[in-house]
Image: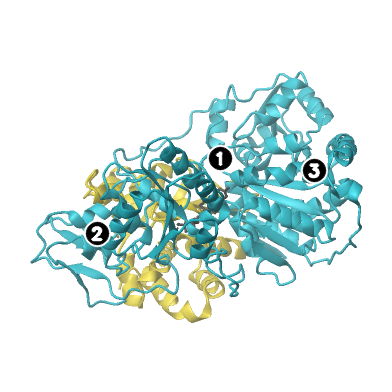
Chain colours: A yellow, B cyan
Amino acid sequence: MTSILIVGVGGQGTLLTSRILGSLAISMGYDVKVSEVHGMSQRGGSVTTYVRYSDERVYSPLIDEAGADIILAFEKLEACRAVKYLKIGGAIIVNTQQINPMPVITGAAVYPDNTLDLLAESGAAVYAADALSMAVSAGNAKTVNIALLGVLASHMDIEKEKWLETLKITIPARLLDINLKAFELGYGGSY
Amino acid sequence: MKFLMLGNEAVARGAYEAGVRFASAYPGTPSTEITEYISSYDEVFSEWAPNEKVAVEAALGASLAGARSMSAMKHVGLNVAADPLFTASYTGVNAGFLICVADDPGMHSSQNEQDSRHYARASKTLMLEPSDSMECLYFTTRAFELSETFDTPVLLRLTTRVSHSRSLADQGARREFKRAYKRDPQKYVMMPAMAQKRHKFVEERVLALKAFAESTDLNAVEYNDKRIGVITSGMSYNYAKDALGDKASYLKLGVVYPLPETLITDFAANVDECYVLEELDPYIEEHCRALGLNVKGKAYFTALGEYSAKLIREVILNEPPEKTAGIPGLPGRPPVMCAGCPHRAVFYALKQIPGLIVSGDIGCYTLGALQPLNMMDSCVCMGASVSMAHGMDKTGSRAVAVIGDSTFIHSGVTGLIDIVYNKGSSTVIILDNSITGMTGHQNNPANGMTIKGEPTRQVDLKKLCNAVGVDRVFTVDPFDLKGFTKLVKTELEQNEPSVIIARRPCALLKTVSFGAPYVIDKEKCVKCGMCLKIGCPAIFKAADGKSAIDSTLCAGCAYCTNLCNFDSIIKGGGQA
Ligand SMILES: Cc1ncc(C[n+]2csc(CCOP(=O)(O)OP(=O)(O)O)c2C)c(N)n1
């Protein structure tokens, strides 16, 4: 069983990422469950999506605490919040983007300035990437989700070809080029 | 061929394959996508109704006319549609009639955590509960046949995790279905003489359904280790399988009303310890107790929120879960109104009026209750803002009602009639953002577009309010901070009812584009923090203590420029 937790802020495009992962797993012959978030928390709140696949039947779509093999975090603070879901020895891929939550904006709370250290101290293998800059150099800030997917792909044991095939069937044709570019930037880890 | 389908998508597909010809619904998380997916099938007439009661009645009409028909709603929607449900149980159906109802354990996007299984029992209506997308599709197609076989509406109970998870499901072809209309006043005109006969039929039908529940393949028994037995249904079955695997035996109920008493009794007798795993109320558990079975349920498992494999492992297997250290003390991230949201402006204006009670309602604008706006005193159910403001006004408090366009049509207008008819003088603000926002952008009667995005006759909110007897109706842009605030103050002083239509489209609509994001002129910013008071997610205090605007989040709406007395918020030159 492989369990991947995707976390971010409502509006960042986490859903598309989880769908692409789901399609990829199916194309490899696995049973898959993906749990999505729709509704209230989409409005700028914390969002969590779960992807689980296995060559045996997958029952629960959810990942319990200490149950994720990998966490893909679209935002630093959300990465910190999610770390308790990571298995001991698991990996966390984190976009270095900072999005201030309302308690920080109103001054009721402080955004921690050492999020990456906090993650490392928790024992996780941390891979940080500036996916927003990658997306911008690919040509559109909205491709940040696909850039991150590229980063994830570079840390997983799945052939790159498979990823590219899945992107081609899941992303609308007119947006494909720019997204492939973002993916490559993420995969290569440079921009 | 198998597809990775959302539970709600699979329900829609099942209905399509079963030959459904009519679907009417009012949106509500987590049920909304059922009807959205159905609207993509041109063989089905689909619509957004003004509320759930209308939707269920329209679908019942289609069923009597001979078309397989359906409606879908969130749990609280069934409260609104309960009236037709209880009597539709008496009339029965002509062609199959399905009502999907989606509960929300954990209240991801709801105002309460009610358990709709009680409605099945109270209305004596067959209820099925799938646990994944494959079952969503299969149970839905079966529901229509069962509806016709037993002459009953069928309830399909979903929960958030079933509705909003994707898993593999087989797609098949559509089979067309049509029955002729048959006039039958004895069956369809429910007045005492006829209804008494139909009640007898309903009681007989319950017995027939009980017999069906004993033998149907929708319920499944799976014997493994018999020291632990689990009676469960829906998503809880998945959690139990993950947690216990072969270490337990299972009775998985696909029919949750009526319950198969013999099957349950036999299962309980075959296992040493019998647990009932069900989120929310002890519905199955209490039935087991009535059968004299000593099952373990809510004494071990909570009635609050969602279950998980971890919880089940802890309680039943006594396994301490693996734990990794979390990071304590992190700031929370509650949902917020989007950058550019017109609702923010309404609440900021209301905040300028001291001592005002704001009778709130349900929609994106409920977020006005949170910090820093913190401008809502109550929020109960759809439409309640208007009627509650009337109760407050009549007993000496100064209240204004705030209600969205979709919510006003749903059940706000009846409250407004109450105000007019009973000589009230409340001020009602309709936040008309031209869309049903909270549930993810559905068209509604007030925006002049159908579910398929086709133009249609639009409800004229002003004329509607005039027609029920409100003379003071004003349509204004809430982004005009001074003008809007003044108008509210004036209307509060009137001895007659007023309606203020705060009209500005949702910032997320494709038709809305403000242009480039704004930036802070650091030379001019005096760190007064005024611009932070509106709770815009794009504006924050930078390390130098001055305000800053996140260009990836700013919508360019310019509302914040209303607040800056130093002209330090200026249009940027960046990309739009
Ligand atoms: C009886 C009932 N039906 C449906 C819902 C789900 N729901 C909550 S708010 C809302 C609509 C909000 O639309 P609108 O009033 O236009 O406000 P907006 O979100 O656009 O600001 C819906 C459908 C509910 N809470 N209760």
Task: Say what amino acid the circle numbered 2 marks.
Answer: Ile
Which residue is disc 3 drawn over? B89
Cα separation, mark 3 vs mark 1, equals 26 Å
Q: Quadrant of the C terminus of chain B?
A: bottom left
Q: What percent of the width, then of the height, locates residue B343?
A: 37, 57
Q: Secondary structure at mark 1?
A: loop
Q: Secondary structure at mark 2?
A: strand
Cα separation, mark 2 vs mark 3, equals 54 Å
Task: Say what amino acid the circle numbered 3 marks.
Answer: Ser
Q: Is label 1's Cβ within 8 Å of ligand 1?
A: no
Judged left or right of residue B557, residue B249 is right
* Dot 1 crowding, Cα within 10 Å, few <14, some 14–19, many 20+: many
Which residue is disc 1 drawn over? B105
Can residue B289 be spotted in the picture? Answer: yes
Work out whether residue B549 or residue B249 is closer to the camera in this orientation and state it: B549
Query: Could you tell which of marks 1 and 2 lies nearer the N-terminus?
Result: 1
- Closest to the camera, between mark 1 and mark 2, is 2
Cα separation, mark 1 vs mark 2, equals 34 Å
Say whether marks 1 and 2 touch (CB < 8 Å): no
Q: Secondary structure at mark 3?
A: helix
Q: Quadrant of the N terminus of chain B?
A: bottom right
Q: Chain of mark 1?
A: B
Query: Could you tell which of marks 2 and 3 lies nearer the N-terminus?
Result: 3
Q: What percent of the width, then of the height, locates residue B497?
A: 44, 51
Which residue is disc 2 drawn over? B539
Query: Could you tell which of marks 3 and 1 lies nearer the N-terminus?
Result: 3
Q: What percent of the width, then of the height, locates residue B103?
A: 60, 43
- Closest to the camera, between mark 3 and mark 1, is 3
Q: What percent of the width, then of the height, locates residue B268?
A: 76, 25
